[in-house]
Image (tube, rainbow, N blue to C red):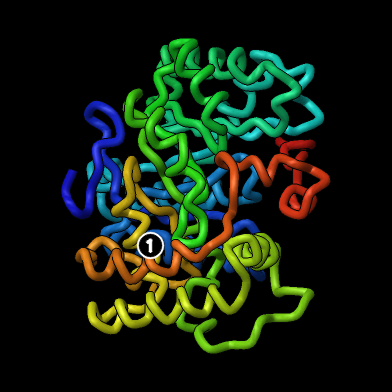
Amino acid sequence: MTAKTFELGPGYTISRVIRGGWQLAGGHGAIDRNQAVTDLIATFDAGIWTYDCADIYTGVEELIGAARLRLASARGLDIAARMKVHTKLVPDLERLATISRDYIRGIVDQSLRRLKTERLDLVQFHWWDYDQPRYVEAMGWLDELRREGKVRNLGTTNFDTPRLAEILAAGIPLVSQQLQYSVLDQRPAHKLAALAKTNGVSFLCYGSVAGGFLSDRWLGVAEPATPLENRSLVKYKLIIDDFGGWDLFQQLLQALKAIGDRHGVDIATIASAWVLEQRQVAAVIVGARNQAHALANAKIMDVALDADDHAKIAAVIAQSQGPLGDVYTLERDRHGRHGSIMHYNLNAGRT
C-alpha cells in the first residue's frame, strides 16, 4: 500500500479514493450522459481510477461502461484496463425467500453487459432481511461465478459482525466490505474491524462526508428544516441527530475547519482523510458532481493527519451519543427512523 493505492486482493490494486456512482442515478438532478462520461474520465485523469456502482443505480453501470469504451478508443486497451469498477448485487427484498442460482447469475450477466466487460472486478453483495437466512447460499452461488471467471473478487455490503462471520466461516473468499464510516459514525470500529482484520477483509467506506453535511457549506448554518433537498440529506441528518444533535455537529465542523485551514484543504477533505486512516480502511467512496469536484477529491490522498489533528477530532467524538449498535443495524429496522426511508425492491423489472 502507498498513500494513494491499496492492494485489495492478491494482484488487485485500487486507488484509495473511489468515485461513487449514486449521484449519477438521477436522485440528485438531471444527468447529461455525454458530460457524465467526460467527467468520469476526468476523475480517472485526476488519479481516482476506481469506480463504485450497483445493479440498482439506474443507468450508472451503463455510464461507466461507456466511459471505459471511450477511454479504450481514445488511449488504448492498456490504459482502459487500469480502470477498476466495483459493482453491487442487491437482491430485491421481495425475492429473498425464493432467490435462486439463476437469479444471481442473471444480475451478474446484466452487470457484465452494462459495464462492457467479460469479468467484474468486484461484486459486493447486499441482503435486506436476516429473517430470510439464505444469504450464505447466495454468496456460494456468487463464488461459483468467481470460479468460472465472471467475477474477480467478492465483497459484501452492510453485513453486521455475526453474519459476516457466517459468510467467512462458509469459506467465501471475501476481500472487502462496503459500509458507512465517518467522523459521525464509527459503528464499524466497535466489533467488525477485529473480525475483518483476522480474515483479511478491508473496508470500502461510503458516507465519509455524510451526503455533503461534512463540508464548509454547513459551518455556522442554522439547523435545516424539513423537507430536505434529497434522500441522502434525510439519511445523514438522522445520523447527525444520533451523533448528538446540531450543536455538537457544529463543534465537529469547527474542529475540522481548523485542521483543514492548517493543511490548506476544506472540511470535506479532512473528514475523508480521517476515515482513510482508520483501522481496516482501504478506501473512501466519494461523489463528484463535476470535474472540479473530482480534482478536489483527489487531494484526500495527499493529506496526512498528525496526532494533534486526531486529538482535536477525538475530543468532539468523545461527546457523541451514537449512532449505536453494529453496522447497518439501525437501517435494517424497516419501521424505524433510518430504515423507513430505504427503497427495497429496485431490481424489479430489470432488463
* Residue type, numbered disc 1: Ser
Position of residue 1 in the picture relative to residue 167 (left or right): left
Q: Quadrant of residue 271?
A: bottom left
Q: Position of residue 299 (x, y in %)?
A: 28, 68
Asked whether residue 191 is in view, the answer is yes
User: How far across and down, in percent of the image, does residue 186 sit?
Assistant: 47, 51
Residue occupying the far front of the picture: 319
Which one is in front, 294 or 280?
280
Name which quarter of the figure residue 96 lies in. Answer: top right
Task: Looking at this view, name the residue that lies furthest to the left.
Answer: 2
Which residue: 34% across, 60% down? Answer: 274
Q: Residue at x 52, y 52 (%)?
A: 63
Residues packed near mark 1 inside 10 Å, few (<14), some (14 to 19) or many (20 plus): many
Pick the residue in front: 39 or 87.
87
The residue beneath circle 1 is 272
**Residue shown at 67% from the left, 45% from the top:** 330
Can the viewer see residue 113 in this picture? no
Total numbered badges shown on the rendered structure: 1
Whether residue 275 sits left or right of residue 216 in the image: it is: left
- Quarter of the image with the C terminus is top right
User: Which residue is more in the foreground, 110 or 20?
Assistant: 20
Q: Is residue 244 left or right of residue 311?
A: right
x, y (%) of residue 148? 44, 13
- Compared with 191, 322 (above or below) is below
Q: Position of residue 59 (x, y in %)?
A: 62, 51
Does residue 210 lie above or below 195 as drawn? Answer: below
Secondary structure under the numbered disc 1 in the rendered image:
helix
- Look at 72% across and 30% down and name the residue there: 129
Query: Considering the image in quadrants, where does the N terminus appear?
Result: top left
Q: Is residue 248 above or below residue 37?
A: below
Task: Give 167 or 193, whichever is nearer the viewer.
Answer: 193
